[in-house]
Image (cartoon, rainbow, N blue to C red):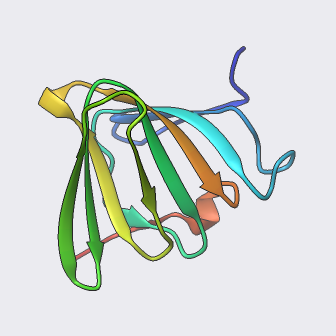
Amino acid sequence: MWYKNKIVAPDGNEVVYELTTPEESPTRGIALADITRSVMHWHEVLTETYVLLSGGLIIKTIANGRLQQIVLTQSLESFVIEPHVIHSAEGMDGKPARILALSTPHWTPEDHFIYKK
């Protein structure tokens, strides 16, 4: 297989293909992700960079009580999400967007918190 781990969101709207694992690369992670719609969540320590590879991506963030929407439409456009920033992403027009997801340190489920209003 070309990926190390495949992680599918419970609702099937996000599929992440880890190219590195936390065991082999604890300080940084590299993954491809196909996102139709992710749930609002945040990380305590993780910084993520989303790099658009195909499709279009709408990123919603909440930081300091302020809602922001970022739209990526050009291949290789990117956006950095800092720790504690609540965020979600969805493909434009209901179609999945493919992104390169870079993280520092590596993503782990212990640092993935679902946002509940």
* Apparent side of residue 109 relative to residue 86 in the rendered image (left or right): right
Q: How many marks?
A: 0
Q: Nearer the viewer, residue 108 or 59?
A: 59
Q: Is residue 39 above or below residue 35?
A: below
Left or right placement of residue 99 versus residue 64 in this view = right
The single residue placed furthest to the top in the displayed view is: 1
Residue 33, relative to residue 106: is it above or below? above
Residue furthest left as drawn: 93
Q: In the rendering, at what x and y percent does residue 76 appear?
A: 43, 32
- Res. 21 image quadrant: top right
102 relative to 21 in the view: left or right: left
Q: Nearer the viewer, residue 23 or 59?
A: 59
Q: Residue at x 46, y 39 (%)?
A: 51
Does residue 20 appear to the left or right of 11 in the view shown? right
The quadrant of the picture occupied by the N terminus is top right
Q: Residue at x 61, y 53 (%)?
A: 103
Which quadrant would the C terminus be assigned to in this image? bottom left
Residue located 60% across and 36% down the image? 31
Residue drawn 38% across the image and 38% down it: 77
Rendered view: 55 above or below 67: above
Residue 26: x and y in percent read: 80, 56
Residue 92: give x, y in percent of width and height: 18, 32
Query: Residue 62 occupies which quadrant of the picture?
Result: bottom left
- Residue 53 horizontal/vertical position (percent): 42, 26
